[in-house]
Amino acid sequence: MRKDLGLLRPGDEIAVDLRTLTARRLDLVNDRTRQTNRQWAQLLEFFPALERALNLRRRARLFSSPATRCRPAIRRSGATRIGTWLRNRKVKNAAALAETAVEAARAQHTVLPGETLAAAMVARIAKGVLALDEEIAELDALIQARFNEHRHATVIRSLPGMGTLLSVEFIAATGGDLDAFGTADRLASFAGLSPVPRDSGRVSGNMRRPRRYHRGLLRAFYLSAMASLRTCSASQAYYGRKRNEGKGHKQALLALARRRANVLWAMLRDGECHEALPTVTAPA
């Protein structure tokens, strides 16, 4: 009945599977963040010396051992035993981490009420965080295997800054088929990278950021543009040119992401991988 609405395209089988896997992974990551923050807050109540010395949001494995659940246990175990336990579980910088924990336990002499039960709760939360880490690792393996089966996997991943997860988010957001968009401009508009006119009456040229766009696709383009600044000379040159024009960091990154949308569109249209342009040295 209406000619201004686009057709619903659910995407191919692989794209639907990747959308399901990425949605589940996002839920697990959010759950891990919530539990890690709760663990940090709980530990801060009875062991502030260790919280001050370490980044506890990434040290869940340290508190999953009975030898490190409370300050007296850490002092009794010693740095050697704790370091060996962490090293057997492939924790990076195990010796330094154990030394820091023991020094923090010796530095705090105040015994706070409820310390024993709070330490047990921290250990329980730590086990939940480790279980989430294992499930996320399993999902990453499934995502990697399923993504390699997609026909555009090699082309998308060849673009600098587009790792496996960002490439999967791109396929999950677009359905794996760019024919639904028609042009690169429509793809950029769907991702929120193209301004829309907000003209009224005689006022023209009033461009504003769109309010309705795909947040996941914008995130994929934005993060890939940020990552490309470390390795891609063309992205570095374009970003530098936009900064010289007076744009801020975020504006320059969005402009770079818009340009990369055109590049990725052309790559998928022609079925060709990205090739870095040779560096041309200006004559002295």
Image: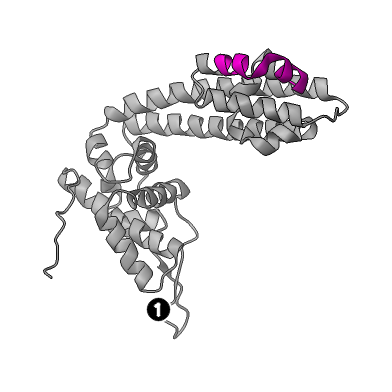
Q: Position of residue 63 (x, y in %)?
A: 66, 22
Near-viewer residue (58 or 97): 97
**Magenta stretch encompasses residue 73:** yes
Q: How many marks?
A: 1
Query: On the picture, is 91 further left or further right than 245?
Result: right
Residue 3 visible here: no
Report the residue at 39% width, 52% height from top: 226
Near-viewer residue (215 or 167): 167
Report the residue at 27% width, 39% height from top: 157
**Magenta stretch encompasses residue 33:** no
The C terminus lies in which quarter of the figure? bottom left
From which residue to which does the magenta span run? 70-85
- Say which residue label 1 marks: 205
Residue 265 lies, with reference to residue 51, above or below; the image says below
Q: Position of residue 58 (x, y in %)?
A: 58, 32
Report the magenta stretch's main SS.
Answer: helix
Residue type, numbered disc 1? Gly
Q: Position of residue 181 (x, y in %)?
A: 30, 51
Near-viewer residue (276 or 169): 276
Report the residue at 78% width, 31% height from top: 108
Return the residue found at the far bottom: 202
Residue 11 lies, with reference to residue 59, above or below; the image says below
